[in-house]
Amino acid sequence: MLDQRHLAQLINQDQRQHFEELGYLIVENALPDSLVARLEARIDAIHRHHLEAEYDPYTRRPLTADDVFFYPNFLGRDQLFVNLLDWPKTFPLVWAILGWNIYSYHSHFIITPPRTPEQGPGRMGFHQDSGRVNRDIQTHPRPRLSLKVGYWLSDCSVPGRGNFHVVPGSHLDDDMERPSDGTAPPGAIPICCKPGDAVVFDRRLWHSASPNHSQVTRKGLFYGYGYRWLRSKDDMEIPVELFKHNDPVRRQLLGAGVNANGHFTPTDADVPLKTWLDEQGLPT
Ligand SMILES: O=C(O)CCC(=O)C(=O)O
């Protein structure tokens, strides 16, 4: 539930400026070690289940322990994953950047094992999020629309560990020259984070996963937040129990609402986050 812990983490001027100018923000120690361990155990269990089936239902290919495992739509799999939706260290940044008419339209976790010699050097894939949105909307710069919060469960504090990469400030660029050999474009940097750190990034920021040349398996959770009128990118298989068991703000973030029109013209019942911000005297 939203409470004093959130009010202690309101965005400051430096953070806002950093995000507006560079398109991302790092939040150190966003999660305590004990929670990192519990989250890691939960995603490892899901991973193990799919390894036992020897099949990746998302790529529709055989799955081995050497393959990258991309698991979308994980929110509804576990209450612990839902608990991060309104996490005190990160959620105040989300509402400060996007406002209150938001929900989590997309979630995934990625497990990136060390590359084997047979797999070769690997390639990077710099992109902006949201696929066709970047073609269908004809404005410059493109609108922000959404952001992601990535949480690291493994130690990526040095480069070469499958680090998330970004091109700082590239969120206002509609195109980017990318080397054809799959290496990073000029200006790209690895985000070096410890377990429990988080990165908040604008969907327009050119970013990429990277090959893992270390011996440490890279593990990251990604939570996408967007406007309630933005269609979900996931199938949003959220069990009814999760709506019942969570408070109104979390229900909003899980996609609840009164009716379809309320995505565009929300009433107070659609957006308990707005009511809470109003009660705190925060700008809405
Ligand atoms: O795995 C990574 O580091 C990159 C994830 C990514 O590209 C994304 O969430 O859009």
Image (cartoon, rainbow, N blue to C red):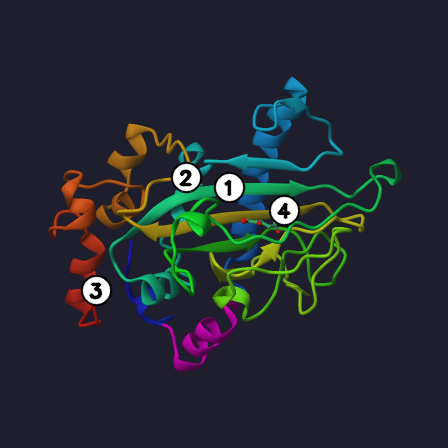
Give the residue drawn at x 47%, y 56%: 203
- Of all residues, the one furthest to the right in this rendering is 117
Residue 180 % position (x, y) = 74, 52
Q: Is residue 97 above or below residue 115?
A: below
Mark 2 CB lies closer than 8 A to ligand 1: no
Residue 219 disc label: 4
Provide the residue span drawn in magenta: 11-27
Residue 45 % position (x, y) = 59, 31
Residue for badge 2: 233
Q: Is residue 105 magenta-colored?
A: no
- Picture quarter containing residue 237? top left
Residue for badge 1: 108
Sooner in the amino-acid sequence: mark 4 or mark 1? 1
Q: Disc 1 and disc 3: Cα gap in Å?
A: 28 Å
Q: Amino acid at mark 4?
A: Lys
Sooner in the amino-acid sequence: mark 1 or mark 3? 1
Q: Amino acid at mark 1?
A: His
**Observer-nearest residue: 6 or 142?**
142
Contact (CB < 8 A) between labels 1 and 2? no
Q: Is residue 73 above or below residue 13?
A: above
Mark 1 CB lies closer than 8 A to ligand 1: yes
Give the residue drawn at x 35%, y 32%: 238
